[in-house]
Amino acid sequence: MSVFDLASFDDHEAVHVFDDVRSGLRAIIAVHSTHLGPAAGGCRYWQYADSEAAMVDALRLSRGMSYKNALAELPVGGGKAVILKRATYPKSDALLEAFGTMVDSLGGRYVTAEDVGITDADMSVVSRKTHFVSGLPVEEDAAGGNPGPFTAEGVFLGMRAAVRRRLGREGFKGVHVAIQGLGSVGKVLAEHLAADGAKLTVADIDERRAAKLAGELRATVASTEDILFTEADVLAPCALGAVLNEETIPKLNVEIVAGAANNQLRTPDDGQRLYDRGILYAPDYVVNAGGIINVMAEYLGDGDVDAVRKRIAKIEGRVENLLARAEAEGTPTNFVADQMAREAIGRG
Ligand code: NAD
């Protein structure tokens, strides 16, 4: 299928496809919007079923970044890169440098950072070839570096707003949260929730990781098949996208969905499905903006960790306002968030 025919292509400004024969790098950089500034969004390193799946992922993620950055009130647009993981060309300095050269060739229209499968050390290698990069290793009290913990902080706050609204509870004491994925965001989110008295059920495809964290936090481990359908107050998807869909939504057993994963809804209609089931959905890109708030402070040289934390703290009020508006309008929360974001990027 041609890229122009993909539903996710819709309103992208540009999509760049790269194939570097020497290093084996195959990558896509999707630029959704530069209306508010350079298109900013991380780089994902992932094994896709085929190149169309990689393209769809890049397009969906880049539009999500436009919406996320706009609602986080950042002076940047939205874009995303994906590097196609290939068994014959494992991740190497040469491959990451080639990616840096490709980012640089766009002259600053796209600014990269890490996402799933990419570390801050990888970003250091990318930075040998381009200045249009963020999420590099930093000193302790400087903004920037690994965005995961900052994303987790924002998800915690956004979830707290949803718990207040739906369950009428202040904080997490006795609130049961099921977390899917215990990577750089999910693990720190679990720690925040446990510290605030939540009861946790967790799962990760890395069973040792799940068992270790469960031991530390007195959490229950579920299988990766069961975690989505755990009977709990909140489901926090913190692995990959599209987990909320026609097949899974009828089987959910929670009051609230609030998590870090990008593009949790397979399609916007899945927001309607959640709404029809009476499940309160805290839109992913509103609650998971902490990481990009942090890396953009680093990139723009715009404040230290304290300033970043103050900006992340606003996520709680933002989610509260959004949920209140959606309830007043009788509209699924994702539709309200998308509408607000489109207005902010001049496509209302
Ligand atoms: P990560 O790669 O560090 O962790 C993902 C974890 O999920 C891994 O431990 C992996 O083993 C696990 N996992 C994968 N598939 C699973 C499954 N089916 N069931 C259970 N566990 C599974 O990634 P991360 O940085 O923690 O990001 C998690 C999600 O949040 C991603 O969707 C990412 O796009 C999104 N996100 C991350 C950030 C950030 O700052 N890192 C910011 C915004 C959004």
Image (cartoon, rainbow, N blue to C red):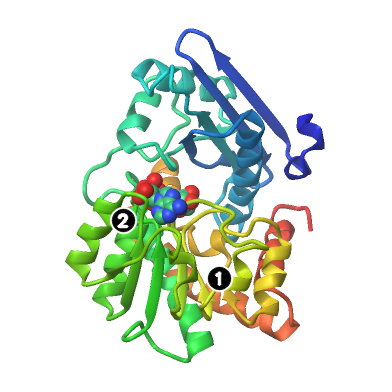
x and y percent of residue 90 in the render?
A: 39, 21
x and y percent of residue 134 in the render?
A: 41, 38
Which amino acid, by three-letter code, is at mark 2?
Answer: Val
Residue furthest toward the right?
Answer: 5
- For label 1, the crowd category at 10 Å Cα-Cα, with few meaning under 14, some 14 to 19 and many 20 or more, is many
Label 2 element class: helix
For residue 320, side relative to residue 90 (left or right): right
198 over 225 or under it: above or below: below
Q: Which residue is tagged 1?
A: 282
x and y percent of residue 236 in the render?
A: 45, 66
Q: Quadrant of the N terminus?
A: top right
Label 1 element class: loop
In depth, the one of 150 and 296 nearer the eye is: 150
Q: Which residue is tagged 2?
A: 305
Residue positioned 58% across, 55% down in the render: 68
> Residue 319: which disc?
none
Q: Quadrant of residue 335?
A: bottom right
